[in-house]
Image (cartoon, rainbow, N blue to C red):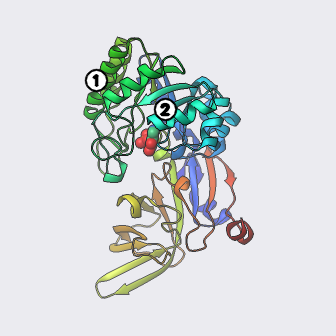
Amino acid sequence: MKVSGVDLGAIAEEFGTPTYIIDFKRVRKNYMRLDKALNCPHVIAYAYKANYEPQLVRMLALMGSGATVPSAYGVMLAMWAGVPPEKVVLVGPSPSRQDLEEAVMYKALISVESESEVEALGRIGKARVMIRVNTGVGAGAHPSLITGGQKTKFGLPPSRALSLARFLGSTMEVEGFHTHIGSQILSAEPFKKAVELLTKLARDLGKVNVIDMGGGLGIPYLNEKKFPLEEYSQVVCRASENIGALLVIESGRYIVGDAGYLLTRVNYVKEVGKEKWLLIDAGMNDFLRPALYNAKHRITVDKEKPKEKYLVAGPICESADLFGEYDLPKLGEGDLVVIRDVGAYGFSMASRYNLRPLPAVVAVDNGKYNLLRERENFGRAIFG
Ligand SMILES: Cc1ncc(COP(=O)(O)O)c(C=O)c1O
């Protein structure tokens, strides 16, 4: 299989497996499609948590992208990538003192989510802030991906967000309101409801400079429809223009999701009764989404029919280390298996669970490839 003119088999041969591939050309295309669709003053503050590979975020910064970061290290990485401070947004429900200090020092925009966070911030200094609102709207492909609605730790109810914004006016630079309703959303409808509430709050407050609609734009993993980008952009642009505010979008998955591939090889095939297990060398430590969100990803192999039913699983001593049931051509030890659409929340969620090294990461771009991250060795993985 070739991606951006590079043969993935040759990469697996040279760097071993499991190895992540990032197609930089695809990332640029995704970013430009989103940027073009947003027909109003906007900043795409790419969500670093989706994939924080330094060369990747630097390329996006060169294209004009901002950064949504969850921590002090995220702020530092955005600075390193050359993102201007006014395009950096610190977002998280419980930032540490270091997270806040770094954001204040760099003059990043801080999304505050509680009155007690504001007190802590006040002890650090004057900051540029927006208030994160729980609009009551939540959406996403799995309960753990929903960040708005009932019983959520995120944001403040609208009336409290408004009171806090009024109260803060004299001590902080209050830029506006923020929400992030969830992730892997495939309809514009929930965004419409959320943006209506944010614009109402903005009007009640008077003037705001920014409304930040968070991320959440989904991608088709299997047979889902594409995200309705035009409809979404009309909805959010109309709202932000009506109140004369800059629109901030914190998209992650939409920009990098389909640009990632996980190269893995078959270790063993094991038959028990009617079940045929395809045991591959990548596991939930390398790629967590199936175990965490019950997510199913496309798998591609370089073989033809006849197809067989396999339960595809990794090497980790957990029954949750399962990629799902697949109809695949007959495979055997050493065959290459490519897990698709792993560019978002892939490497960035990887761990060393079961004493395994973090995998290698390779960039491909217009027929060329480049090792971004070596597979960890014993010393690095175990002793740190
Ligand atoms: C506050 C915030 N913004 C943006 C994102 C990015 O979301 P997505 O990758 O779905 O665009 C997330 C993801 O969880 C988030 O929590």
Q: Residues within 10 Å of mark 2 (few under 14, many from 20)?
A: many
> What percent of the width, then of the height, locates residue 177?
41, 25
Identify which amino acid the numbered label 2 is placed on: Ser
Along the line of sight, the residue nearer the viewer: 34 or 151: 151
The residue drawn where x is 34% and y is 35% is 134
Residue located beneath label 1 in the image:
196
Q: Which residue appears at 52% of the width and 33% of the height?
A: 119
On whether ligand 1 comes within 8 Å of the CB at mark 2, the answer is yes
- Residue 361: quarter of image: bottom right
Q: Does 67 appear above or below 4?
A: above
Q: Amino acid at mark 1?
A: Glu
Dot 1 or dot 2: first in sequence order is: 2
Quadrant assignment, res 207: top left
x, y percentage for residue 347? 55, 55
- Image location (x, y in percent) of residue 57: 61, 38
Vertical order, 352 against 361 (above or below): below
How much space separates mark 1 and mark 2, taking CA atoms?
19 Å
Residue 98: percent from the left, percent from the top? 64, 42
The residue pinned by badge 2 equals: 111
325 sits left or right of 382 in the view:
left
